[in-house]
Amino acid sequence: MGKKRKHQEDPAAIQDHNSDECGGPSSKKMKTTVPLTRDKFIFHTILGEGSYGKVMLATDKVRKESVALKIVKKSLISDPECLVEHHVLKLAHNSRFLTHCYAAFQTEHHAYFVTELACGGDLRDYINNSTIPLKDPVTFIAAEIVCGLLFLHSHNIIHRDLKPDNILLTADGYIKIADFGLALCEFDKRFSTRNYGGAPGYGAPEMIKGDFHDAGLDWFAFGVILYNMILQDSPFEGDTIEETKSNVMHHEPSYKNLADYTAVDIMSRLLCKDPSVWLGVNGKIKKLPFFSNVNLADIRTGKAPSPVITGYNMDVSMRQRIPAPSSGDLNEPIPAEEQKIFTSLSFVCPAWSTTYH
């Protein structure tokens, strides 16, 4: 939803990840279930906020789990294409590199997505923390992102808003790609970008020009993220958004005499201006020398331990309660024709179905 994610300063209630396919702790089958509604949650703080809505840290009262609860204004997603996020979140249980969704429900004015809580902050926090050595974890994180993107693209989904803010870290140092509010499905049809330019510095030249695009956009953004991690800088930094866009269009990134030729090799292939030769779209990215020191098969299956240390205090502590978000000025009813778009939105994953319906 194009938000700027705030520092996740209260990771207190992360649960054990020995779980079923939905990522949540298992529980014995209950004889009856109750409706999943907003009053089943205690709200603690805002984790992120944007034009579509906000993401809240919340605790489920019945299951006693802490979750991230994304609240989206229906009036802003009246186009069926904007419900791609719902489709991606339900599909995400098949990939360990995507944020998993436990349930979705709705009120007249809002759609609610209950997702797992990745409490290690986001990748931007990690990169900006100068006390954390980045050399060893970079290849591991990059390999995880590659696995996540290959999964999305294999299901004809492009993320379109990949940036460090939208790559979360779990308590044990694994990534979770998040925020699919701008994702598109069936990208083989190719889409025009005239109404969306991408995050400044991460959007590819095709996005800036408003040309048709495909999965190459995600690989270009990945190249920028890789540059962020390796050189702790931006390849296209400008003093203004327009200058940044101009640099994306015309400026060749400087690799600052980087001695690691494998890093220069992969970044230069990802950040080239010609989309017809973009790495990821053309060429087997997993076969590059950059990944020669990691076992991609073990990373993909979760067998490889993460070298990433988030440095967060995981002690469970008392947290503040805040009032449930109000509907504000959303008093006008949404037309019945637009409400039909949300007919199939509500769902509960198998683990949560033992408690809710």
Image (cartoon, rainbow, N blue to C red):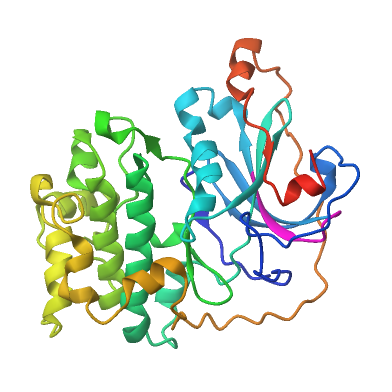
Give whichever of 331, 170 is nearer the camera: 170
Displayed quadrant of residue 183: top left
Q: Is residue 323 above or below residue 110?
A: below
Q: Is residue 162 visible?
A: no
Residue found 34% across the figure and 32% down from its top: 186
Q: Quadrant of the C terminus?
A: top right
Decide if residue 97 is on the left or right side of residue 43: left
Give whichever of 98, 211 is nearer the camera: 98
Q: Residue 41 at what x, y percent from top left?
A: 81, 50
Decide if residue 231 is on the left or right side of residue 180: left
Displayed quadrant of residue 21: bottom right
- Highlighted range, magenta: 61-70
Displayed quadrant of residue 267: bottom left
Residue found 27% across the figure and 76% down from its top: 230
Residue found 70% across the figure and 36% down from its top: 105
Q: Residue 192 at what x, y percent from top left?
A: 26, 29
Q: Is residue 11 above or below residue 212?
A: below
Query: Tag count in the figure?
Result: 0
Give whichever of 197, 182 is nearer the camera: 182
Q: Residue 285 at what x, y percent from top left?
A: 20, 62
Decide if residue 272 is on the left or right side of residue 201: left
